[in-house]
Image: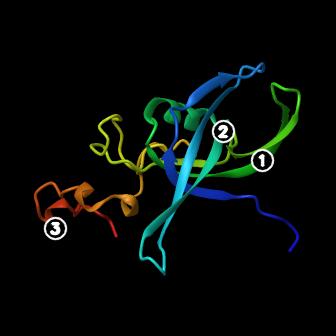
Amino acid sequence: MAGSVNKVILIGNLGRDPEVRTLPSGDRVVSFSLATTESWRDRNTGERKDRTEWHNISIFNENLGKIAEQYCRKGSKVYLEGQLQTREYTDKDGNQRKATDVVLQRFRGELTLLDSKGGRGEGDYDSGYGQSGGSFGRSSPMERGPGERRPTPAGKLSDALDDDIPF
């Protein structure tokens, strides 16, 4: 195999409201923390146990950043795809530190809001809103839910067909 893959897929809940920063270049970065939780039953006690992992998320994609800023709040459930990126920085005490973030780049990445419209009552969006590539909403008939079918004009398929087709 000639190449390599750096792809992260996460489904989790925001640990804090998205924070927007502007870089010296004028580009905006939206960042937040995302919690993923693994649950299982202990074999010996039968007790339910959880383990939560926290991920730092940075969105450099302008469109996805706007969606996150406008519709995501602490507790929102999201699906995202990005890449791992490690950065080095100096903390307040002068110590060198490393941090690994999940980054949604300018022309890559995906963000899908998973909360239903009435689920938390904070956002006004559909569950498929905010997908990558500038596709805001469901466009394919295959992606529509059962309640989103378009009815035929007269209620019968034969009435909706055009009889003037020349072939």
Say which label, 1 or 2, has the lower sequence index: 2
CB-based contact (under 8 Å), mark 1 and mark 2: yes
At mark 3, the secondary structure is helix
| Image quarter in which the C terminus is found | bottom left
**Spatial CA span between label 3 and label 2:** 52 Å
**Spatial CA span between label 3 and label 1:** 56 Å
Residue beneath label 2, please? 58
* Callout 1 amino acid: Gln
Residue beneath label 3, please? 158
Q: Residue at x 53, y 31 (%)?
A: 66
Q: Position of residue 153 (x, y in %)?
A: 15, 54
Residue beneath label 1, please? 85
Of residue 100 and residue 44, the one placed in the foreground of this image is 44
Of residue 36 and residue 146, the one placed in the foreground of this image is 36
Q: Residue at x 77, y 63 (%)?
A: 5
* Callout 3 amino acid: Ser
Q: Position of residue 97 (x, y in %)?
A: 84, 39
Q: Residue at x 52, y 41 (%)?
A: 15
Q: Relative to residue 126, is residue 72 depicted above or below?
A: above
CB-based contact (under 8 Å), mark 3 and mark 2: no
